[in-house]
Image (cartoon, helix red, strand yellow):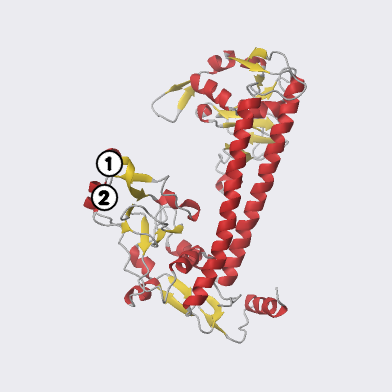
Amino acid sequence: MKPEIKERIEKINRGQVPEGYKETKLGIIPSKWEIRTIGQLVEDGIIQKPMDGNHGALHPTSKDYVDKGIPFILATDLEGNKLSLSKCKHIKKEVADKLQKGFSVEGDVLLTHKGSVGNTVVVPKIETEYIMLTPQVTFYRVNDRDKLSNYYLHYHFQGETFQRQLKVMSKGATRDYIGIVAQNNLEIILPTDIKEQQKIADILSTWDKAIELKEKLIEQKKEQKKGLMQRLLTGKVRLPGFKGEWIKLKIKDLIKEVNDRTTQNNQYEVLSVTKNGIVPQREQFNKQIASEDNTGYKIVRRYNLVFSTMNLWMGSLDVLTTHDIGIVSPAYKVFEFIEQNINPLFGKYFMLSDYMIRIYKLNSEQGASIVRRNLDMDGLLSSIVSVPPVEEQLEISKVLQSADDELTLLNSELEALKQQKKGLMQLLLTGKIRVKC
């Protein structure tokens, strides 16, 4: 970074106004940039008046959904500021026509305004005449692209300054919500030169492409690991130097339940079992949601297996490898591995394998809820499985751990890219760094 640019950023961060800049209620910005509300952009005809959130009196029902039709976009489809039209729901065209409102087309900027507020995408190329939106999503259509870049608007919606406005204005008693009137009052920092807007959007889109490529690589590696697990954990592929029959054992010969409990409140850190492993509850929920007094919680130690009997068939289980000790809700079951029969590191992969998920499902009975199934613990523990000798287990776990290490590195690189983009957005969208057009 050039010394003069670094000096300018430091000066602005100290609250001083450099030459060529001005102070506004949204901070110090370039003198020729403007602060415009969405309502002003609507009045000037730069963007079309957004819909009011009531996208017609009708709403699709289960019988209206089809494999191929008009894409019907839910707020959840915009999570991560992305939209995959192939993965969203589709509805019959005659149903979409009856809804009358909420039509959106290629190039529109979408913004979620209820529940999860602030996710945004630009509608990609579509094969249908239009797409439909849930009432939780607003669309903004740029009428005058000589004055406003739809992609600049999209990135500005993601920016820290705009997101801070959303957070303040959308707080509700139960769910966050920001109506169309309030949206009209949202303010945008706007370069007056359309070429500068476009250049900013182009730079940030380059980072998005790098992030997307990294995410695709991670998904490919996950699929490779999944295939590796299926082959190695079932004996379809053997590692060099190993042969002979695997050992048939009951699951109760592999794991033994432990029931150690805390004797005082907050004796150890509260943990939760998630799709990303066993993690501190405060990280998963940004707060601790356990009982105020967690005396009597179950103690879990490194290499213990932990699972919920309600959701075991969905893979709601893991082995603790990131902490020496912690505590979990009494609703969980905690087991230790019988190491003469199964290596704990191998056990982590084995118990999470598709092979074992099928066994969990066979021993889970559906109750009142489709999702929640009651586990037949005796049936599970009596189930017979095949495992390799402990020496082979150890070598298999090393191969799979290597795949995990590669994924950890890739995820760290992905997070670094996201943080770099976030920092760059804050500099570009406030004019602390100017771009050459």
**Mark 1 crowd level (few <14, some 14–19, many ≥20, 10 Å Cα):** some
The residue lying toward the viewer, choosing from 299 and 61, is 61
Q: Which of the 4 quarters of the picture holds residue 276? A: top right
Q: Is residue 183 above or below residue 131?
A: below
Q: Position of residue 359 (x, y in %)?
A: 54, 20
Residue 62 showing in the rendered view: yes
| Residue in view at x 55 percent, y 81 percent | 30
Find residue 160 and report its horizontal and vertical position in percent.
Answer: 54, 65
Single out the residue that lies furthest toward the bottom: 19
**Residue 314 image point, x, y percent:** 51, 30
Picture disc at residue 96: 2
Q: Nearer the viewer, residue 114 or 64?
A: 64
Q: Position of residue 238 (x, y in %)?
A: 70, 23
Residues under labels 1 and 2: Cα distance? Answer: 9 Å
Labelled disc at residue 235? none
- Give whichever of 402, 266 is nearer the camera: 402
Type of amino acid at the residue the image marks with label 1: Asp
Is 254 placed above or below 329 here? Answer: above
